[in-house]
Each structure stands twice: as structure tokens, then as C-alpha cells.
Amino acid sequence: MSEKNIYLPYLMTIDKVTKEAPGVKTYRLKFQDEAEAAAFDFKAGQFGEYSAFGEGESTFCIASSPTRKGYIECTFRDTGRVTSGLASLEEGSTMGFRGPYGNVFPMDEWKGKSLVFIAGGIALPPMRCVIWNALDLRENFKDITIVYGAKSVNDLVYKSELKEWTDRPDVKMVTTVDPGGETADWKGEIGFVPAIVEKVAPSSENTIAIVCGPPIMIKYTFPVLEKLGFKDDQIYTTLENRMKCGVGKCGRCNVGKLYICKDGPVFSREELNLIPAEEY
Amino acid sequence: METKYINISGLEQWFDAISASGKRIYAPVSARGQVDFMPVKHLNEVAKEYIQTTQSVKASVYPKAEVLFSYEKVHGKVNLTDFDPESVSETVLWKVHPCDAAGFKPLSAIFNWDTTDKLINAHLLKTTVVSYSCATADESCFCTSVNGSPGNVSGSDIQLTILSDGGAIAEILTAKGEALVALLPGVFEADRGDKKEKYLVDLPAKFSLEEVNAKLNKAFNSTVWKEQSERCIGCGACAFVCPTCACFDIQEDTHGSKGRRIRCWDACGFALFTMHTSGHNPREHQSQRWRQRILHKFSYMPERLSVVGCTGCGRCSRACPVDMNILEHITSIAEQ
Amino acid sequence: MEKLRGRAAALLADGSVALIIGYEEGTKRPRPLFCRNSESTKKLIFDSRCINNLAVYITKKELVGKDRIAVTASISTLRSILQLYVENQLSEEKLLVLTVDLNGELREFVTFDEISAYVAQFELKRGEREQEILSKIEGMNREERWKFWLGEMSHCFKCYACRSACPLCYCSKCVVEVNRPQWINPWPAPLANMEWHINRAMHMVGRCTACGACGDACPVGIPIDLITRKMMKDMAPEFGYIPGQPAKQGNALSSWKLDDREQFIR
Ligand SMILES: Cc1cc2nc3c(=O)[nH]c(=O)nc-3n(C[C@H](O)[C@H](O)[C@H](O)COP(=O)(O)OP(=O)(O)OC[C@H]3O[C@@H](n4cnc5c(N)ncnc54)[C@H](O)[C@@H]3O)c2cc1C
Ligand code: SF4
Ligand code: SF4
Ligand code: SF4
Ligand code: SF4
Ligand code: FES
């Protein structure tokens, strides 16, 4: 058999487009080739390279849960050449996908523990994958708490799912918007994510905290978690350095000796302490 | 592995036989005031008096721009055309110096780290390397400090050591080397017992890799990076002439409904190499980029890929417009 | 040399400047040196072998910071400084310029007018190599010229050393890095290289001071300095430039006049 070309993407059909927030869309993608679909598998935390033929590739995490078979989803913000090319595609069009790449959230190790998800802005996608994964295997975990914040009500993504999670009795869901971002009928919290986490004060007892968001949010959330008694090996996050290949070859995503595309994107705070913060 | 002797006219005949076999031969040619690898038909076109080619030979296995695959959009569907390994021609790289040949190992290590790279492997598979041991060196050379030597055979299929009579000791090192010899076996005579070492330049080691490595393990926050790199202007010259630098960009070449995805050389010295679309740049300053260059080669690669990312060829030092001399800088780190 | 070193040490010692950019002996030729203390000024040299155009550093914020700095300047560097000043990239308060004149005397320039007056004494000369290639190119017809440059450009691997070495290429995002729209195909290939070089030349018309830094920096020996050099020669009579003097009237690509004789511009 001839060698596989790792840069050759799978061809995917855009099965469903959901507008999440201004400039943010979710695509549900299905494999055009059935054999490829059958052989495909991934785990929570992994990412891929998504192609807009004619524009290039962009890196997004897989935002759907591995427990939902037959498709993958990605949620992306239109920010540059490739993402705007992707955003202009319609349902039924073809795009490319390579992956899954990177390491995973150690969900098997988390069995029997409580989970606290803390996300800000567009960083909910990587989290959404783990959240659904945990909810689909709900009996494996104790309490599940989600704290999600965005700049304004308009910027919150996955609005229908946020509602679904809010309505579930087995999830403690807290949504917040930055001061000034609320609407007249806003019923959630008002305030920055770290402050809200402090207010919600989840117990650190036998609990894992997963934090995804802009660097500034992460920077202020870690000390709050520390105060609540979370040890470094109880805190997980994902890093997003600039990527091209996704497979450890193009040389641009490393933080010290670790390659975010291979050794990451998932890191415990314990692991983060070993690499220079300056490089991410 | 077998050692033979080949005389001067035998070398010419053998070269002609390789040429006649239809294989492409790339060899150092002197043109436009520089010596660089170019397609060659006869041995007399090959450059003689020079220390080192300006560029490394890596472009022959890792072209500066190469099509990863192409595609065509038809009625909302996309047809992909994969890179075809058959499109790669059998190539002989002639008169490669040991420090250049030694670059294939780190290059291959990067490209084949856990997943294999179909493109470079197709080139490597069809490449036969005939190296020449070094009888001369200049002040930029330091192969002996990085596990190499003027007679190092790593990466070579055949190594020639030119003797005073113009003939050569031929070390036939691999099956590919044997196949090349088989094109004209008659010109190879029994080894005359010439001592190879006698014909090699004497190049004492300038630093110890272990020492450098130990220093670098603690050097991330050192001021040395800023001190050394103030004059660095952040171009890609050092990376592009280097036999082991592998960093690349992936770009799109679009023509209407058709297009090609292209991989092209990139360099960690460029200011925008790590810049996110948001504008955030984890390596904002040149000193951080210079640190990446040194640490990648002398610390990260040894640790992650078990191979040093520098063969001591000195090309980066020769190419740098502002005389960033890697030997000088590594030596000074070792001595700190 | 001693005068230069002494003056440099004094300037740093009394806090007149925080940094002096000069030259030191390198491993193959003199190279740029950054002096932040008087000790390092002992390494300063200044002679005709010092060819790097140091003006390239004085617009780099990460190097110069907010402080006043000094630079030792050759005629080429002086010309670049003047052009940078014309382009509002420098201010007199932040820069002290030192040079050694033909009599070996140390000269100091506090104002750009002084530099202007000094530079005006020097005619822009062409080196032998440049003259030789230029004459060759001028003797070619259109097709031959295109072939010559296409051949030269085929060696370009887009290391952008030419751009990095040029004091006037100070854009933080170069036109080759803009991808919406993608003006220039960013990979190295003969035509894509031509796109880069034509764009570069266009951006340099009337700005290039003919220092030759781009050509000196090119590791693969492409005489690219001759492109802007030739353009300068051809454009000078049309736009009233004086080769070797700053283009006070703005550069050809980005300036226009209401009374332009071309229609398309209005
Ligand atoms: C592991 C990982 C997961 C990510 N997940 C998501 C997600 O789920 N949703 C989302 O909206 N964004 C995500 N991003 C960020 C996203 O990749 C960039 O915003 C996007 O690539 C911008 O691409 P562009 O081509 O439109 O921008 P341009 O500025 O046109 O970028 C050109 C090229 O630069 C590269 N590039 C630029 N910025 C980045 C960046 N920050 N990270 C990686 N490559 C970059 C792209 O590969 C692209 O080829 C993720 C990034 C990483 C590394
Ligand atoms: S880093 Fe410099 S000396 Fe080392 S292999 Fe590369 S070009 Fe040669
Ligand atoms: S030194 Fe820089 S350009 Fe070269 S391979 Fe390492 S990271 Fe890439
Ligand atoms: S070290 Fe020299 S060749 Fe390398 S980026 Fe810096 S200036 Fe360019
Ligand atoms: S310095 Fe030379 S090789 Fe590098 S981009 Fe400029 S012309 Fe091309
Ligand atoms: S994305 Fe290419 S090495 Fe990590």
C-alpha cells in the first residue's frame, strides 16, 4: 500500500450551518466517503485542520462530542482569509478536514469526580466537546458545573444548548456577561468570569476544573481556583499557538520543547508550569 | 560496506555512466559568483576550488516550494489529486560534503516524527548520495564539534576521498551505493590500502555538545539571547541555507476552480512566524526568535528527536548579512 | 578611531545617549555593535569596510526604546537617515549622528539640515560591479532583460534578507504578508519571486537611497539593488528627484498632485 499523504484532507459535506453569534458559525460536517467515516474516531480535546478550497487551512478544535457518531462539528469566528472563505460556504458545500490531531482530555481518569467547566467567549467550542461527552456519560461523573461568560448577550455561543444545560437538573449552569453587555431581560450573572467563579465557589474536593478562554481570563481564573483549593493537577486548559501542519513538523507551535499540536493542546496546570509562559 | 579504489579516468567514466543511466545528477557548479547544486551532465562541470556551497543540498529532497496535492471544484464537489511519488525522478547528489549529507538524518527525523511525510520520503527513496570527504575547511566549519567529521559517512551512500593522483578511495556504504557502482563496476579496483585520514582536513572540536546542552537546559531566561541577537535583522537567510532547517508554511495557489496546496520554506527568525490572527505574538522580539533557533537545534531536537539540529557546516554564518556567527555564539554559551 | 571611542564613551557616561549603534570587528568583516556602556565602546571601529547600513536599526522600537541614541553613519547611512526623516520616521531630539569625514575627523550632526548639507558634497557614485552589470542590462532589449531578471529571480528563495537589511523597509506588515487580498504569492517560484521584486521596487521608487544594503545582504547573490538603482535613474528626470538626496516631494507610488498631467489619477 502506498504511503498516506498526511496533508491530504478528508472531503466533508457541510450538513448544517448554525449562526451562533456575530461572525461565529457552527458547521456540522459529514464524511463524503463512507469508509473514511467508519474508520474515523477521535477523543475530546482534539483538533483538526479545516480547508476552504481556494483559501487554505485553519485550525479549530472538534466542537462536537465523540459520543455523537457520524459527524463532527466546528465552531469558528470569521477573522482572516481562511475563516472568511469558510464562512462564505453554504449547506451542502464541500470543505476539507485533516485530523484528529493532538492529545486529549484524560476523561477516563476523571471517572467518579466532579467537573467544573469555565469558559469565556469563543473558547466554549473545545469545552462543548467535553461537556457533551461528560453529559452523554453522565453516570461516570458526580456534580457538573458550567460557568460560561461572554462580552455581551449577543456574543454568547450555543444559545440553545446553554438553555438545555440550564434546564437540566443534573447540571449547575451559570452564564454571565461582562458589565454593560447585558440586555433588559438578561437573567444570568453580570460580571467577569473569574469573579463569577469566585462567587459560585465550586468545591475542589475530588473535582477537576477545565478552563478555556482568552489568556487574560485564564490568568485571572487560575488564582481564584487556587484559592478554592484546586491543586495544579486538578486544573486543565487548552493552548492555541499558531499552527500550520498540526502534526509536529512545520515548527511554529512549540512552547519551549513542547509542541502544542502534538503534546497539546490539552495541558494540566502542572504541565504548564514546566514550559515557558512567555511562548504562548 | 566495501572499500575500493577508482582512478581519475574511472571517475569520469563512472560519472558518464550515471549520467547515461537517465538519473538526474546534482552537483556543485560555480556560476554567478557562487557555488551551488545544479543539474550536471559531465564531471568537468563540477566546481573544484571552493569550501562549501552557499545553499545546502536539502532543496533536492525538500524543495523550496512543493505541491502537497491539487484539487478541482466541479459542481460543488471537489476532486483531489494526491502528490504522486512516481513524479519524483531518480537523483544522484554528487560531491555532497559530509556536513551536508549528515543533514538528511535530522531533516528526516523532523518530517517523520511519529507520522511519515510522503513527500520527503519519496525524494529520499530516490536519492543516492555520493559525498566527498573534506580536505579543506574554513573558519566557519565546525562539524567535529557536533558529532561529525570531515570523513563522516552519515547520510552518504558512497563516500569518495580524493587522493593525490586524482583518483579516490570509494567507500561503498549502502545498497543504493552498490547499485550506483553496478552501473560501471569495471572502473572500481581493489582497495590499495590508502589511509583516508591522511587526506582529511584537521579540524579540532571547538566545544562539547554535552556542555552546550547542559548550559542550554538552564538558559531560557538568560540575557545571552538579547546580547547576541541585537544585530540580527530577522531574515530567513540562516534557515534557508541550513541543511537541517525544516520549518514550512502551507499556502494556497488558486486559479479559478482549480488550485494547489503548496508547502514552502519558512523560518523561525521571521517576525510574523508565530503571530496569531488576533495580533498576539508569543515571539515578539528578535531575541526570542534567536533563542528558538539555538534551542531548537541544540536542545529541543536532541531531546525530542534524539538528533542534533546542526551539522556544523557553517553556512548560516557565511550567509548572515550581519555576521551572526553560530560557532562564536555557541562557543560563548559553552564557556559561560 | 580613538576620538570616536572617546566621544562615544563620553556620550554614554554623561547620559546624552542611552545607546550607540556602531561597528565592531566581526569574524569575517566588521559588523554592527550596540554599545550601552563605555566599556563596549572600546570595540568601536569605523572604516570603509563597515558596509552594513545601520539606519536599519534606528526605527526598531525594541532596540532603541524611547531614549535618545547615537549612530555612527557612513554616507549611505546618512542618506537613509535623511530619507527616514523625510518620511517622518525620526526626530532630531532622539538621534545624534556621528561620522568620520574624509580627513579622518570626527563629525557630529544634531540636526537633519546639517546632515543634508554634509551629504550634498558627495555625489552618488556607482561601484564597478554595479556599473558593469548595469551597462550590460542597459544594452539588452526588453525580452533579454526579462530573461536576465527571471533567471536571477529564479535563485531567490524569499529569505527577505534584502527587505530586512533595507532601512526603508520598516513596515510592520509587509505587502507580501498581507493575505486579504493576497497581493503576492508568498512561496518562492520564478513568477512569484518576480511579483515580490516588482512590488518591492514599486515601493522603493523615489525612496531608495542606493545604499546597496539589499544586494549586499542577498545570500544568493542577486544584484537586486540595481533594480531600484535603475528605477531611480529613470525616474529622477520625470519626478525631479536628485539621486542620493531625500525625496522631499514624496515617493512616486503614493503621492499625487491635482495638476498631474496623467488623467487616470484624477
Ligand atoms: C488548537 C487550536 C484550536 C483552535 N480552535 C478554534 C476554534 O474552535 N474556533 C475558532 O474560531 N478558532 C480556533 N482557533 C484559532 C484559529 O485557528 C484561528 O483564528 C484561525 O486559524 C484564523 O485563520 P484565518 O486563516 O482566517 O486567518 P489568517 O490571518 O488569514 O491566517 C492565515 C494562516 O495563519 C494561521 N493562523 C493564524 N492565526 C492562527 C491561530 N491563532 N491559531 C492557529 N493558526 C493560526 C492559519 O493557519 C492560517 O492558515 C484554534 C487554534 C488552535 C491552535
Ligand atoms: S545551523 Fe548553521 S552551521 Fe548548523 S547546520 Fe545549519 S547552517 Fe550549518
Ligand atoms: S532553527 Fe528555526 S527555522 Fe530552523 S528548523 Fe529550527 S525552528 Fe525551524
Ligand atoms: S542570524 Fe543573520 S541570517 Fe539569521 S535571521 Fe538573523 S540576520 Fe538573518
Ligand atoms: S535577499 Fe535575495 S534570496 Fe532573499 S528574498 Fe531578497 S532577493 Fe530573494
Ligand atoms: S502545527 Fe506544525 S509543528 Fe505544530
Image: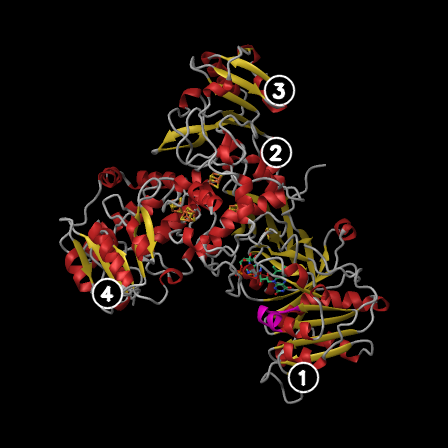
Mark 3: which secondary structure?
loop
Q: Which mark is residue A189?
A: 1
Name the kind of residue labelled 2 in the image.
Glu
Q: CA distance from mark 1 to mark 2?
A: 62 Å
Q: Kindly identify which residue carries mark 3.
A: B1
Q: Are marks 1 and 2 on the same chain?
A: no
Q: Kindly identify which residue carries mark 2.
A: B86
**Number of other residues with Cα within 10 Å of mark 2, as a class: few under 14, some 14 to 19, many 20 or more:** few
Asked if residue B247 can be seen in this view, the reply is: no
SS majority, magenta: helix
Q: CA distance from mark 3 to mark 4?
A: 76 Å
**Number of other residues with Cα within 10 Å of mark 1, as a class: few under 14, some 14 to 19, many 20 or more:** some
Front one among C233 and B196: B196
Q: CA distance from mark 2 to mark 4?
A: 58 Å
Q: In the image, residue C25 lies at what x, y percent?
A: 31, 44
Label located before the other in sequence (3 or 2) = 3
Q: In the image, residue A124 lies at what x, y percent?
A: 67, 69
State the quadrant of the C terminus of chain C.
bottom left
Mark 1: which secondary structure?
strand
Q: Is residue A280 above or below residue A225?
A: above
Q: Is mark 1 within 8 Å of ligand 1?
A: no
In the image, which is nearer the foreground, mark 1 or mark 2?
1
Name the kind of residue labelled 4 in the image.
Asp
Is B125 on the left-hand or right-hand side of C110?
right
**Number of other residues with Cα within 10 Å of mark 4, as a class: few under 14, some 14 to 19, many 20 or more:** few
